[in-house]
Image: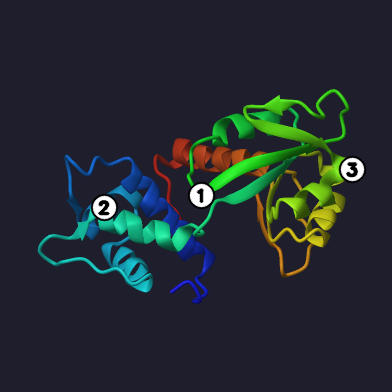
Amino acid sequence: MQDKTFPEKTVERLILYRRLLMNLDPEEKSNIFSHELSVMTGFTSAQIRRDLMAIGYSGSPVKGYEIKKLYASLSEFIDAPDVQQVAIIGLGQLGRAIVNYFRGRREKLEITAAFDKDSKKIDRVVNGVRCYSIQDLEKILQENNIQIAILAIPEDQAQYMGGRLASAGVKGILNYAPIQLKLPASVHVENRDMIMAVEKVAHFARQVKENGFHESIS
């Protein structure tokens, strides 16, 4: 199952299903149907069934999906067997907010190192995460086998730093800088431009105000 390559949108949906199941109490509700997940997600029941069958999990027409087993199956697909360590580059306001928010939220993902060029931040510990000098980036990443990084730095530094991360063996980057990184295909990059996201929300907010509804065209 893990050798199969899944489209990004499918992986995003599977992660969403698990997050929703995480908020359910299996003692109060032991089973769930695809049509219930459809209401919660906005995806069709057929799409949900296809997604879950793709990871080898199928429910019962009578009882639906057993929540505990479905959650375990999704976790087996989404998570690595061992904890994956994550580095964050930039310990400014955004970087600190990410560290504070992320800590303890996922068992198999942990931010274990931060990097910054500000000497006042180096060797400090923020919510359990030690900040290292950016000069020691490659050394710390390789010593700890860190292959995931979060960029929380200004736009003019992001491409250079993304290149350093790629050269150091990082395989996945979550980029918060408002720039599209140009990196080798061997590195998976997720861009999170918050200004673009707010612009998108503002556009559709106007649509709702002017038309009284939001028509999504896929």
How far is mark 1 from mark 3, CA to CA? Answer: 28 Å
Q: Does the residue at mark 2 contact the one at mark 1 (Cβ under 8 Å)?
A: no
Q: Whole-percent x and y of residue 126?
A: 68, 27
Q: Is residue 127 above or below residue 152?
A: above
At 33% from the left and 71% from the top, the residue drawn is 50
Which residue has dot 2 on it?
Answer: 68
Tell me which label, 3 or 2, sits earlier in the chain.
2
| Quadrant of the image occupied by residue 176 | top right
Residue at the image point whose x is 76% and y is 61% from the top:
169
* Residue located at (78% from left, 47% from top): 140
Q: Nearer the viewer, residue 121 or 20?
A: 121
Bin the neighbour count of mark 2 within 10 Å (Cα to Cα): few under 14, some 14-19, many 20 and up: some
**Any part of residue 192 in sight:** no
Residue 88: which quarter of the image?
Answer: top right
Q: Residue furthest front?
A: 143
**Looking at the picture, which amino acid does disc 3 mark?**
Gln
Is 148 placed left or right of 81 in the picture? right
Residue 160 drawn at (x, y percent): 87, 52
Identify whether 54 is placed above or below 215.
Answer: below
Q: Position of residue 45 (x, y in %)?
A: 27, 62
Mark 1: few, some, or many residues within 10 Å (few <14, many ≥20)? some
Q: Upstream in the sequence, badge 2 or badge 1?
A: 2
Q: Position of residue 67 (x, y in %)?
A: 25, 53
What kind of element bears circle 1?
loop
Measure the alpha-carbon separation of dots 3 and 2: 45 Å
C-beta proximity under 8 Å, tags 3 and 2: no
Mark 3 — residue? Answer: 135
Left or right? Give the position of 171 relative to 154.
left
| Image height of 72 relative to 123, above or below | below
In the rendered structure, which amino acid carries the disc numbered 1? Lys
Q: Check residue 108 in the rendering and tell me which mark sits there, or answer none.
A: 1
